[in-house]
Amino acid sequence: MKVNDSVENYVNKNTLDSEQVKPEQEGHQEKSSLKYMVLILACLLMFGNNYSFDNPQALQRQLTEDLNISISKYNLLYTAFSFPNIFLTLIGGVIIDVLGIRVAILGFSAIVVIAQTIIAFGGLFKSFWIMLAGRVLFGSASESLLIAQTAMIGKWFRGKELSTAIGYIMTMPEIASAANSFVTPTIYDHFNGLTYPLFFSVFLCFLSFICGVLLCILDKKNDRKQKELLFVYKDNVSEKSEQIEKVSFKDIKSLNGTFWILILICTIAMGSYVPFLDDANDFLQEKFEFSYIQSGRILTLTYLAAAITSPFLGPYVDKVGKRRLFILVTCIFFSFTHFLFGYMKQGYHDQPNWFSIIPLITLGMSYSLYCCVLIPSVQYVVQQRVIGTAFGILGMFTSTSMALFPILAGYIVEKATNKQEGYSTVGFFYSGVSVFGIIFTISLYFFDKQSSIILDFVNPENPSQEEQTILKNIKQQNNEQLGVFEDIDDDLLKMEGEENDEEEFPKDEAFWEKNQRFLVSSKGFSTPKLAANKAVQERTGSLYY
């Protein structure tokens, strides 16, 4: 897909949103206040989900003891969460594109509540298999809910606002995960059982569902109001909207090389973040000799680091652009952080190694960069009308890594002579995986430059004059290398045929020299003028001269 076309088509779907704002400038302040409300509700939408997702991590030692399961079996709770999404997130993305964002948010958030209830009953009856079944259902809805949330944010926040909004959106889940690491072990200690901490998660999921309902009500009311204004403003918008909303699997073919490279980078980044944290509680206890209470509280630093830095990184990236550079920094941070986890020594004389706090903080900062840079970058390189499908593909790939990496990590630990050695190897394993992310990021500078260059623009959807010139030059260079000459004067092949008879066309030597290679190479005529005459006649029925 051509970059100019990509940018144009990406804005096309949201042209409806743009046109919804244009005719009612007097309602701008009201729109801004609605945006803040939407942002808050969208943040709270995933709070219960993220709090519940990391319940096993906060109770890792307790689960293995109360349910009498091994580390590998414990990791199945996370594999069961991620494995269905290898297939279902793509379907979820299509559901979002076809049925709409609001239907997806209500449906998936309701399933999350039901799934967490099943998990809580598994803890009540101390049944690993009931919990595992609940995690499968939980995972099936959770990732699709995240896609729906991202699509909703993409609908309300465009251009330079997007990374800022994503930064705030990603703050709340990290706060939820931090709260889980701190609160869940405390509740377990107070009641001495799995039941109460797990049912507390059900309560939080239900509150998030209520926030989802309120979010959908606001979005629907806003859509209804905009449609009323649009009916007065432009009669053909509804027809345009219907045309835009049609989505098919054929649209996957339109996804360019930059999109697929970003997908691979996201897969590696998530694969080295989430699966590591799945075992982080036991990791800190076994390698760095923290108690399980200390481990839960120390882990909050990772989530808090992500939550604190995201609101600042998002606006900064929106201000300076240079997203390819930030993506490279993200991958380097991930690799360096996991190297420290593998290299650092265990505690001394029964005292924890408090220096392990350093990589825990940098891990949170790495994830913050991922959220503020990589996720918005994916939205910038695809058409808005297939954004759900695109994120479905992203979920499919990241779910694959999140399903496989916990199994590999558990295998490494169990095959080692002791857990300390095993967890050190796990750190080096994740560091090595992150190196591939660095390689893929560097490839963005050499392969598919025409598409990836827009990531460096401050506002990829509305490039400045200077950025448009850069884009045009890169496109021309690529076309010349391929022997394709598309970047020619608009006067040569007038798309608006009805204007050709009246227009005065330039015929100076500079004009013919500029377009000569296209005319001869593309059309196969012996002279440029003959080619131009034939080409214009084919398009408009009138002669060039």
Image: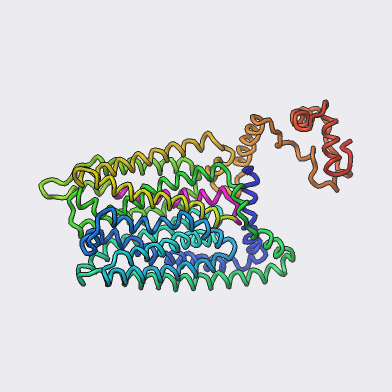
Q: Residue at x 62, y 72 (%)?
A: 224
Q: Would residue 350 appear left or right of 180 to someone viewing this image?
A: left
The foreground one among 304 and 133 is: 133
Residue 104 in the image: x percent, y percent? 52, 66
On screen, 55 above or below 399?
below
Left or right: where 201 falls relative to 212: left
Which residue is most to the left?
A: 349
The residue closer to the viewer here, 426 or 505, is 426
In the displayed image of the protein, which residue is found farthest to the front? 129
Q: Residue at x 36, y 48 (%)?
A: 405
User: What number of labels is visible?
Assistant: 0
**Figure check: 238 above or below 159:** below
Q: Nearer the viewer, residue 30 or 516?
A: 516
181 relative to 321 in the view: left or right:
left
Q: Position of residue 160 (x, y in %)?
A: 53, 52
Write the start and end of the magenta stretch as one range.
360-385
355 or 296, which lies in front?
296
The reply to whether residue 297 is visible in this rendering is no
Residue lying at 65% horizontally and 46% vertically, measured from the top left:
5
Whole-percent x and y of residue 61? 22, 59
Chief SS of the magenta region: helix
Q: Looking at the picture, does residue 374 appear above or below residue 171?
A: above
**288 with respect to 302 (left or right):** left
Specify the quadrant that holds the N terminus: top right
